Image: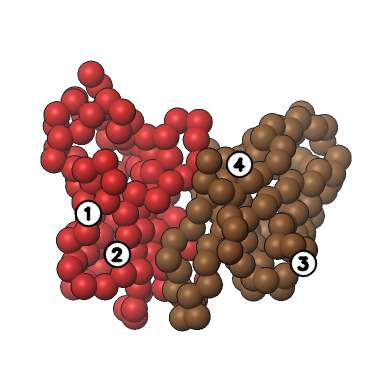
Amino acid sequence: AQSVSQHNHHVILSEAASLELGCNYSYGGTVNLFWYVQYPGQHLQLLLKYFSGDPLVKGIKGFEAEFIKSKFSFNLRKPSVQWSDTAEYFCAPDTGRRALTFGSGTRLQVQP
Amino acid sequence: DSGVTQTPKHLITATGQRVTLRCSPRSGDLSVYWYQQSLDQGLQFLIQYYNGEERAKGNILERFSAQQFPDLHSELNLSSLELGDSALYFCASSLPTGTGLHYGYTFGSGTRLTVV
């Protein structure tokens, strides 16, 4: 069965620090990949997505993610975080076989 | 405003009761998905409807049911409520792609259900 793992459950960073959140999935076929963000008290919003082509994709608010097929990974990065990036981040691989399965989420806390 | 409308925003009810959550998808989207978000279970997929028909089921309890109407709005019915059903219930919608893969979901603001 397909699965997704987000190894970092809670990350605390200072402003201007660099961020990398891990996401690994288990599915060998064609897959679309998504990162969603949920700001405190809000709904999930699409941060970025990978369908095909350049494995380095850029999203909103300076976020980017790199798809490494051989590692089944789709890690989220941001060079310099801001206090406003405090939120929960969810990775979701889409295999086309059913609804999106979301990872357990990573809670990011950015300290000013 | 994401374009996906969920009502009500908050709901407080007693154990054993029944409630109905409503979702209107974004204009043009044919699929509606229901998710339950709780602290201990994370985001759990409950059920999907596509153009009025049930398409996929996830971890939905037998006490829960859903339907999608001809105007594409959907309702999630939760009955014989238990304390453990307290959670955020999100609805999401998406465009059909024809391939099974998705372009991405648009989420509503959710309904926070508290069972007392």
Q: Quadrant of residue B63?
A: bottom right
Q: Residues within 10 Å of mark 4 (few under 14, many from 20)?
A: many
**In-front residue for pair B107/A67:** B107
Residue B63's place in the image compared with B111, above or below, is below
Circle 1 residue = A58
Chain letter of disc 1 in the image:
A
Residue under the point 62% across and 55% down: B25
Q: Can see residue A22?
A: no
Q: Amino acid at mark 1?
A: Lys
Have a look at marks 1 and 3 and say if they share a chain.
no
Q: Which residue is mark 2?
A: A50
What letter labels the chain drawn in brown?
A: B
Q: Which residue is mark 4?
A: B110
> Which of the two discs, 2 and 1, labels the residue nearer the N terminus?
2
What residue is at 13 percent from the left and 40 percent from the top?
Answer: A79
Q: CA distance from mark 2 to mark 4?
A: 26 Å
* Circle on res. B91: none
> How far across and how far down the image is residue A46, in percent?
40, 51
Q: Judging from the image, what secondary structure is the residue with disc 2 in? A: strand
Same chain, marks 2 and 1?
yes
Q: Are marks 2 and 1 in contact (CB under 8 Å)?
A: no
Q: CA distance from mark 1 to mark 3?
A: 38 Å
Within-10-Å neighbours for mark 1: few <14, some 14–19, many 20+: some
Q: Are marks 4 and 3 on the same chain?
A: yes
Q: Is residue B52 above or below residue A111?
A: below
